[in-house]
Amino acid sequence: MMASNSGPTALAPAGPSVRVRAPAKINLYLAVGDVREDGYHDLVTVFQAVDLADELTVRPARRSAVRTTPPDGVPVGAKNLAGVAARLLATRTKSGGPVAIDIAKQIPVAGGMAGGSADAAAALVGCAALWELRVQRQELIEIGREIGADVPFALAGGTALGTGRGDLLSPVMTRARLHWVLAIADHGLSTPAVFAELDRLRAQGGGPPPVRPVDTMLAALTSGEPAKIAAALGNDLQAAAISLAPGLRRTLRAGEQAGALGGLVSGSGPTVALLCADAESAGAVAAELAGSGTCRSVRVAAGPAPGARVLPNGGTG
Ligand SMILES: C[C@@](CO)(OP(=O)(O)O)[C@H](O)COP(=O)(O)OP(=O)(O)OC[C@H]1O[C@@H](n2ccc(N)nc2=O)[C@H](O)[C@@H]1O
Ligand SMILES: Nc1ncnc2c1ncn2[C@@H]1O[C@H](COP(=O)(O)OP(=O)(O)O)[C@@H](O)[C@H]1O
C-alpha cells in the first residue's frame, strides 16, 4: 500500500534512480459528443505535447511514497496518479517493489494540460526502466488507459488524433513547430464539472455551437502554416469553462489583442493556450499578457514534444 506523504526515510535513496520527463498537452481541437452510459463523452480531439513538463525521479525504497514539489493541490500517497500507475504496473506485470517518486511540478494543476496524466505516464515509463521490464510502449499505453483517458497520449506524445474517450490514438504528421503562450489561472477547474456544465448548457436548449469538423484542423496541420492552424482551433468545452470561470473571456481577448494568431481554452481549462506566428512573437505576446492582469502567470512553450521518456543520467532532456 502507498504510504501517505513521505518522510525523508521513505524517500532516502536505496539504489539507482531513474529520471523521467512528463510533457503537458494542449488540445488544439476538441469536439465533445453526448454523455455515454459509462459517464464518459465520446471525443474527437487533436492533442499536441509541448515542452512544458514535470520531472519525476523514481527510486527503490523501503516503502512506497510520492512527494510533489510544490505540493499545492496535488494529492499525496495513494491518490496521486503517479503512485496509482506504479501500483498498477506492478500488479499487471507481477514484478517491481516499493518505489519513492519525487515529482518536480511545472504543469499547472487542474489546468486542462493533463499534468496528473503526464505524471502517471512518466511513472509507468520510470518504473518499467527501474524494474528492467521488457514491455513495449503499446503495453504501457494499454495500462495507462485504465488510469485515465489522457494517459495514453502522455505516453505517445507528438501530435495525435484522439477518439473514443480520447484514448484511441493515431499520430498526426505535421511539419509545423508551434509556438504557444500559456496563460495560467489562479484557480483550477474540475474536469468532470466542466463536462457536466456542457451537458447542462446543452440540455437547457442549444448550448454553444459545436466546433467545425476536424478535417479543417488536420488539413491545417498538414499545411504547417500557423495562421491556418490558428483559424482551425476549437474546443466544445470552452463555453462550459467560461460559464464556470467567466474571467477566461478577458484572458482570451487580452492574448489576441497582444498579437496571438488565435487562442482557446485547453481541454477543460482554465489554462488558455495562445498560438503565435513564431518564437519571437510568442515572447512579445507573453510579455504583454503578463502585464494585462488577466491571469496568474504566463509561460511560453513549443510543440510537438515527445511523450514521457527517461532522461539520460545527469541530463536535463
Ligand atoms: C478534458 C480532457 C481533454 O483532453 O483533458 P483535461 O482538460 O482534463 O486535461 C480529457 O478528456 C480528460 O481526460 P482525463 O483527465 O484523463 O479524464 P479521466 O480522469 O479519465 O476522467 C475524469 C472525468 O472526466 C469526464 N470525462 C473525461 C473524458 C471523457 N472523454 N469524457 C468525460 O466525460 C468524466 O466525468 C470522467 O469521470
Ligand atoms: N500527480 C498529479 N499531478 C496533478 N494532479 C494530480 C496528480 N495526481 C492526482 N491528481 C489529481 O488530478 C486532478 C486533475 O489534475 P490535472 O491532471 O493537473 O488537471 P487536468 O485534468 O485539468 O488536466 C487534480 O485536481 C488532482 O486532484
Image (cartoon, rainbow, N blue to C red):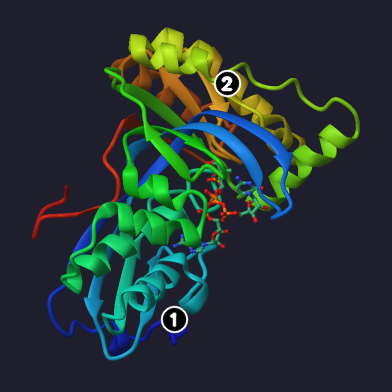
Mark closest to the chain's N terminus, 2 or 1: 1
Give the image location of residue 311, x and y in percent: 16, 54
For label 2, the SS is helix
Would residue 300 be visible to someone looking at this image? no
Give the image location of residue 231, x and y in percent: 52, 11
**Residue occupying image coordinates x 37% and y 21%:** 282
Residue at which label 2 appears: 254
Tell me the quarter of the picture where residue 179 sits. top left
Q: Is residue 70 above or below residue 101?
A: above
Q: Are marks 2 and 1 in contact (CB under 8 Å)?
A: no
Q: How many marks?
A: 2
Residue at which label 1 appears: 5
Give the image location of residue 204, x and y in percent: 91, 34
For label 1, the SS is loop
Give the image location of residue 239, x and y in percent: 72, 30
Category of crowding for the residue at label 1, using alpha-carbon neighbours closer than 10 angstroms: few (below 14), some (14–19), many (at least 20):
some
Q: Is residue 194 above or below residue 47?
A: below
Q: Nearer the viewer, mark 2 or mark 1?
A: 1
Category of crowding for the residue at label 2, using alpha-carbon neighbours closer than 10 angstroms: few (below 14), some (14–19), many (at least 20):
many
Q: Is residue 192 above or below residue 277?
A: below
- Farthest residue to the right: give it: 204
Which one is nearer the viewer's eye here, 48 or 54?
48
Q: Is residue 92 above or below residue 193?
A: below
Quadrant where the N terminus sits is bottom left
Q: Amino acid at mark 2?
A: Ala
As measured in the structure, the alpha-carbon distance from the residue carrying label 2 to the one carrying label 1 is 40 Å
**Residue occupying image coordinates x 63% and y 40%:** 42
Would residue 142 be visible to someone looking at this image? yes
**Residue occupying image coordinates x 74% and y 52%:** 37
Q: Amino acid at mark 1?
A: Asn
